[in-house]
């Protein structure tokens, strides 16, 4: 075998080996710690939109946070004096147990609620996702409701929220701050609510 054919054979062999390795290793997006190694160790909430006793938390079977339900996260604007303000907020925090050798980040959060808005009133949901130790890398999302006559239930999904990760292998406090507001005036009643907040998944990586 001459030198040229030998180099070609070596290149083909190396390509085959690398391809085989890539087929047998899971992608980074699929990596996650065992389900029973992650759990919620504490939950707190505070704010005008979530006074004491107005929030319910539903956990999954493996003690993972699945849904937070709000009873008074409501903003209103109308021609008469309303029961709720035009600006409101709620901060929810939960202590997440992270197994050794892993760090976690925000991946997806979903919001559901009700919007009754006239064409003269603009509604906005502004959220901030805190990552312990990340500081300026906290993630922000803003959703502006359409400026038209709206009377419907809504669902907002935030995906791929953050690129920052928590410290490696520790119990960390994950926090979401959500703010609702109505801007404008109207002779009709306008209402905007957040009824539930769902956290279906986090983003994980080895560390």
Image (cartoon, rainbow, N blue to C red):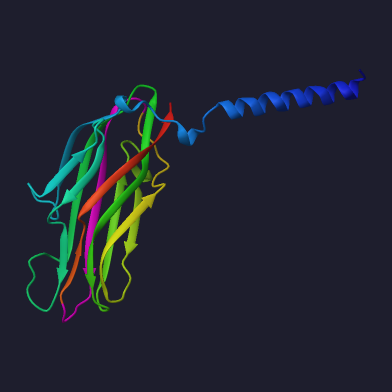
Left or right of 132 on screen, residue 14: right
Dominant SS of magenta comes to strand
Q: Is 105 placed left or right of 184 in the picture?
A: right
Tell me, yes or no, if residue 138 can be seen here: no
Q: Quadrant of residue 187?
A: bottom left
Residue stretch rendered in magenta on the structure: 168-188
The extreme right residue here reads 2
Which of 57 and 167 lies nearest the eye of the viewer? Answer: 57
Question: In the figure, residue 153 lies in which quadrant?
Answer: bottom left
Residue 82's x, y, as percent? 8, 70
Q: Measured from the top left, where is residue 90 in percent x and y?
A: 18, 51
Quadrant where the image shows the C terminus: top left
x and y, in percent, of residue 184 in the image: 22, 75
Query: From this viewpoint, which residue is outermost toward the top?
Result: 1
Residue at 16%, 61% in the rendered image: 74
Identity of the residue drawn at 22% across and 60% down = 180
Q: Is 116 situated above or below 53?
A: below
Residue 17 x/y as whole percent: 68, 23
Name of the residue lying farthest toward the front: 61
Q: Quadrant of the N terminus?
A: top right
* Residue at horizontal 31 percent and vertical 74 percent from the top: 147
* 172 part of magenta stretch: yes
Q: Is residue 83 visible?
A: yes
Near-viewer residue (165 or 29): 29
Question: From the viewer's perspective, is residue 85 above or below residue 106?
Answer: below
Give the image quarter of residue 76: bottom left
Name the residue at 22% across, 52% down: 196
């Amino acid at each position: 075998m001459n030198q040229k054919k030998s180099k070609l054979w070596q290149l083909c062999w190396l390509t085959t080996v690398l391809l085989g390795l890539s087929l047998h290793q899971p992608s980074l997006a699929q990596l996650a710690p065992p389900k029973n190694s992650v759990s919620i160790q504490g939950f707190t909430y505070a704010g005008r939109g979530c006074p004491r006793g107005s929030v319910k938390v539903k956990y999954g079977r493996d003690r993972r946070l699945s849904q937070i339900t709000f009873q008074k996260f409501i903003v209103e604007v109308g021609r008469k004096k309303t029961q709720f303000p035009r600006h409101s907020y709620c901060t929810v925090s939960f202590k997440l147990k992270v197994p050794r050798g892993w760090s976690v980040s925000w991946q997806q959060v979903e919001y559901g609620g009700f919007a009754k808005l006239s064409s003269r009133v603009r509604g906005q949901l502004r959220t901030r996702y805190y990552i312990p130790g990340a500081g300026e890398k906290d993630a922000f999302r803003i959703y502006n409701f359409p400026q038209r006559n709206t009377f419907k239930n809504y669902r907002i999904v935030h995906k791929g929220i953050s690129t920052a990760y928590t410290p490696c292998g520790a119990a960390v406090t994950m926090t979401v701050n959500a703010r609702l507001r109505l801007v404008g005036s109207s002779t009709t009643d306008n209402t905007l609510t957040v009824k539930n907040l769902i956290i279906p998944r986090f983003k994980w990586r080895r560390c």
